[in-house]
Image: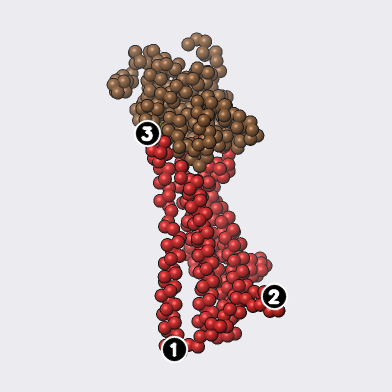
C-alpha cells in the first residue's frame, strides 16, 4: 500500500516486551498502524492479543520497548496516559457498561467528567451516537434491560462519545449469542467506512475479509505473521498460521 | 432470549452474597431474649424480696412542672449518647474510607500506615484505647472530654468500617475500573460515580450492624465520665438505689434506639435494592 505510508502513524509499537511475573506475555512486538487503517488481530487463546491491545491504552504496563500513540509516548507519566486515553476508545468482550446508570448516563459520564463538557452538550453528543448505533429509543433504560447485542452497541457508542481517533476492540462479539453478532459487526463496519483507525481482536474472519487492511497473527506472545487479508488467507507463510486458519475456518 | 433473561444473567446479582440476613431477624431475636431475661429477673427479684418502685421511673424520663415539659436525666443521657454516636459515626466513616483507600494505594508508606492502624486497634482492648485517649492523648492535645470520647470511639469503629469499605469496593468488578480508565475518567470520578454507587447497597447492611455496635460501645465512655445514657444510669442508681428499674430502663432505651435504627435502614435498603433490581 504505497499511498497509506504517507498517512501519519497513529500506533507504533517497537520491541515491546511484557511479563506477568516470570511469564513473558509479549515478545518483542513491532506494529505500525496508520491513520484510517484497520488491523485485525487473531491467534489462539492465551497468545497475548488482549495484552497487546491493552498496552495501547495502558490498561497494562509494558516493561520494555516503546509505544507511541498519536505522537504521545506511553510512559509512567500519568499526563501522557490520560492524554492517550482521551484519544483511544476501547470496547470489551464483557461490555463493561455501568449497570447502575441508564444508557444515556453511561454515554454522558465521560463527556461530563473527563472532558468537562456542559450537560446539554454531553446529552447532544450521547443522543447523536445512540442514533448512530440505532438504539436511541433505549436511552432511559438500564444496561441490564437490553439484549447483549444492544449492550455492546451502547458500549461502542459510549467510547465514541469521547470522539476518539483510534478504537480498540477486544473480541467484541465473543460473549454474544450468534443471532446478535451481526448487528455489532455491522456497527463496526460502518465505523470503518467512516475512516476510523481500528485495531480489532476477533475471530470473525468474514468481518476481517471485508474491513481489514492488514491481518496480524499472534502466537505465544509473538507476532508470527502480518499481511494483507488477501495474502493472509490465501498464502499464509508460517506453519502456525496455516494450522490456526485451518482450525478456525472449519467452524 | 427475552429481556428478562438478558437482564438476569452474569455476576450482576452475585455481589449480593456479601449481604447478611435482614437486621429485623436480629432485632426479633433480641426481643425474645429480652422477654426471657425480664421474666427471670422478675422471678429472681421476687425471690430476694426486691422492692419494686416503678412509679418513680417516669420522672427519670420527663416531668411536667407548671405545665412545662422538662426532660428527665435518662432522655438527656440518650441525647448525649446520640450526639456522641452520630459524631463518632461520621468520623468513623471518614477514617474507614481513608484507610480502605490507603490500603489500595500505590504508596508503600500509605499501606503500612493503614495496616499498622488496623492491627493496633484490633489487637488492643477498647477500654485500654479509651484510657489512652483520655489520660495520655487528651492532656497533650487538649481536647474536651466529649471530643476525646468521640475520637476514641471513631478510631475504634473506623477499623471495622475500613473492612466494610474494602469488601464493598472489591465487590465491584475489575471491568468497571477498566472501562472508566479507558474513557479517561479521573480516578476520583471513577470512584465517586462508578464504584461507590455500586458498592454502597452491599455495604449498607454491615454498616448498619456497625452503627448498632457503635451505639453500644459508646456506653463504655461512662468509664471516663461523659454524661451519656450509661453514666446517667450509674448516677441515678447512686441516688435512688433502684438498680433493677434503672438498668432495665437504660437497656430498654438502648434497645429502642437500635431497633429504630435497624428498621429505618432496612426500609431505606429495600428502596435502594428495588432501584438496583435491573442491574
Ligand atoms: N493479569 C494477568 N496476570 C497473569 N497472567 C496474565 C494476566 N493477563 C494475562 N495473562 C496471561 O498472559 C497470556 C496472554 O493473555 P491474553 O493477552 O489475555 O491472551 P489472549 O487475549 O490472546 O487470549 C495468557 O497466558 C494469560 O494467562
Ligand atoms: Mg483475550
Kindly indicate which chain is depicted in brown in the rendered structure: A
Q: Check the rendered structure and report the hue given to chain B.
A: red
Q: Quadrant of the N terminus of chain B?
A: top left
Q: Chain of mark 3?
A: B
Please give the label number shown on residue B48.
Answer: 1
**Do the numbered discs 3 and 1 sit on residues whose CB atoms are within 8 Å?**
no
What is the distance, in whole Å, between disc 3 and disc 1 at their CAs? 72 Å
The residue carrying mark 2 has its beta carbon less than 8 Å from ligand 1 = no
Q: Residue at x 52, y 40 (%)?
A: A101
- Residue extending furthest bottom? B49
Q: Residue at x 44, y 89 (%)?
A: B48
Percent from the top left, x then y, of residue A4? 51, 13
The residue to which callout 2 is attached is: B68
Q: Chain of mark 1?
A: B
Q: Is residue B148 left or right of residue A237?
A: right
The residue to which callout 3 is attached is: B1
Which sits in the foreground, B101 or B47? B47
Foreground disc of the pair 2, 3: 2
Q: Residue at x 59, y 58 (%)?
A: B90
Instruction: Give the mark nearest the N terminus, 2 or 1.
Output: 1
What is the distance, in whole Å, between disc 2 and disc 1 at their CAs? 39 Å
Count up the numbered dots: 3
Judge the density around disc 2: few (<14), some (14-19), many (≥20) Cα neighbours within 10 Å.
Answer: few
Instruction: Judge whether B109 appears above or below B261 on screen.
Output: above
Q: Chain of mark 2?
A: B
Instruction: Give the mark nearest the N terminus, 2 or 3.
Output: 3
Q: Is disc 3 placed on a helix, strand or loop?
A: loop
Q: Is disc 2 placed on a helix, strand or loop?
A: strand
What is the distance, in whole Å, between disc 2 and disc 3 at their CAs? 69 Å
Amino acid at each position: 500500500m504505497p499511498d497509506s505510508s504517507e498517512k501519519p502513524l497513529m500506533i507504533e509499537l517497537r520491541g515491546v516486551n511484557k511479563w506477568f511475573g516470570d511469564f513473558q506475555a509479549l515478545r518483542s512486538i513491532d506494529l505500525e498502524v496508520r491513520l484510517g487503517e484497520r488491523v485485525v488481530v487473531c491467534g489462539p487463546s492465551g497468545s497475548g492479543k488482549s495484552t497487546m491491545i491493552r498496552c495501547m491504552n495502558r490498561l497494562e504496563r509494558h516493561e520494555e520497548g516503546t509505544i507511541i500513540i498519536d505522537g504521545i509516548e506511553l510512559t509512567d507519566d500519568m499526563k501522557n496516559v490520560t492524554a492517550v486515553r482521551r484519544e483511544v476508545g476501547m470496547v470489551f468482550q464483557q461490555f463493561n457498561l455501568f449497570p447502575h446508570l441508564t444508557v444515556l448516563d453511561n454515554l454522558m459520564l465521560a463527556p461530563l467528567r473527563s472532558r468537562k463538557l456542559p450537560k446539554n452538550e454531553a446529552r447532544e453528543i450521547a443522543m447523536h451516537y445512540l442514533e448512530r448505533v440505532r438504539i436511541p429509543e433505549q436511552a432511559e433504560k438500564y444496561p441490564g434491560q437490553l439484549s447483549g447485542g444492544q449492550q455492546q452497541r451502547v458500549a461502542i457508542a459510549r467510547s465514541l462519545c469521547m470522539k476518539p481517533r483510534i478504537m480498540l476492540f477486544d473480541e467484541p462479539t465473543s460473549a454474544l449469542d450468534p443471532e446478535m453478532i451481526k448487528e455489532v459487526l455491522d456497527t463496526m463496519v460502518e465505523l470503518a467506512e467512516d475512516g476510523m483507525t481500528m485495531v480489532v481482536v476477533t475471530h470473525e474472519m468474514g468481518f476481517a475479509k471485508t474491513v481489514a487492511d492488514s491481518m496480524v497473527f499472534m502466537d505465544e506472545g509473538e507476532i508470527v505473521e502480518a499481511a494483507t487479508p488477501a495474502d493472509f488467507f490465501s498464502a499464509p507463510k508460517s506453519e502456525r498460521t496455516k494450522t490456526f486458519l485451518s482450525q478456525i475456518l472449519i467452524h | 432470549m427475552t429481556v428478562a433473561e438478558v437482564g438476569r444473567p452474569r455476576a450482576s446479582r452475585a455481589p449480593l452474597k456479601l449481604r447478611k440476613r435482614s437486621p429485623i431477624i436480629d432485632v426479633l431475636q433480641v426481643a425474645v431474649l429480652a422477654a426471657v431475661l425480664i421474666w427471670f429477673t422478675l422471678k429472681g427479684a421476687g425471690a430476694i424480696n426486691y422492692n419494686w418502685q416503678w412509679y418513680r421511673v417516669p420522672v427519670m424520663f420527663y416531668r411536667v412542672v407548671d405545665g412545662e415539659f422538662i426532660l428527665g436525666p435518662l432522655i438527656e443521657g440518650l441525647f448525649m449518647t446520640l450526639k456522641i454516636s452520630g459524631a463518632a459515626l461520621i468520623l468513623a466513616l471518614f477514617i474507614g474510607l481513608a484507610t480502605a483507600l490507603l490500603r489500595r494505594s500505590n504508596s508503600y508508606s500509605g499501606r503500612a500506615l493503614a495496616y499498622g492502624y488496623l492491627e493496633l486497634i484490633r489487637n488492643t482492648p477498647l477500654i485500654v484505647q479509651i484510657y489512652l485517649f483520655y489520660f495520655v492523648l487528651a492532656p497533650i492535645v487538649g481536647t474536651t472530654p466529649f471530643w476525646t470520647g468521640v475520637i476514641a470511639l471513631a478510631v475504634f469503629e473506623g477499623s471495622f468500617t475500613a473492612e466494610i469499605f474494602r469488601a464493598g469496593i472489591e465487590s465491584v468488578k475489575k471491568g468497571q475500573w477498566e472501562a472508566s480508565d479507558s474513557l479517561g475518567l479521573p480516578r476520583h470520578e471513577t470512584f465517586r460515580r462508578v464504584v461507590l454507587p455500586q458498592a454502597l447497597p452491599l455495604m449498607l447492611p454491615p454498616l448498619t450492624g456497625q452503627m448498632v455496635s457503635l451505639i453500644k460501645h459508646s456506653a463504655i465512655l461512662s468509664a471516663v465520665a461523659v454524661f451519656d445514657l450509661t453514666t446517667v444510669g450509674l448516677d441515678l442508681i447512686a441516688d435512688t438505689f433502684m438498680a433493677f428499674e434503672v438498668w432495665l430502663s437504660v437497656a430498654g432505651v438502648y434497645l429502642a434506639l437500635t431497633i429504630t435504627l435497624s428498621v429505618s435502614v432496612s426500609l431505606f435498603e429495600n428502596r435502594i435494592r428495588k432501584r438496583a433490581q435491573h442491574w
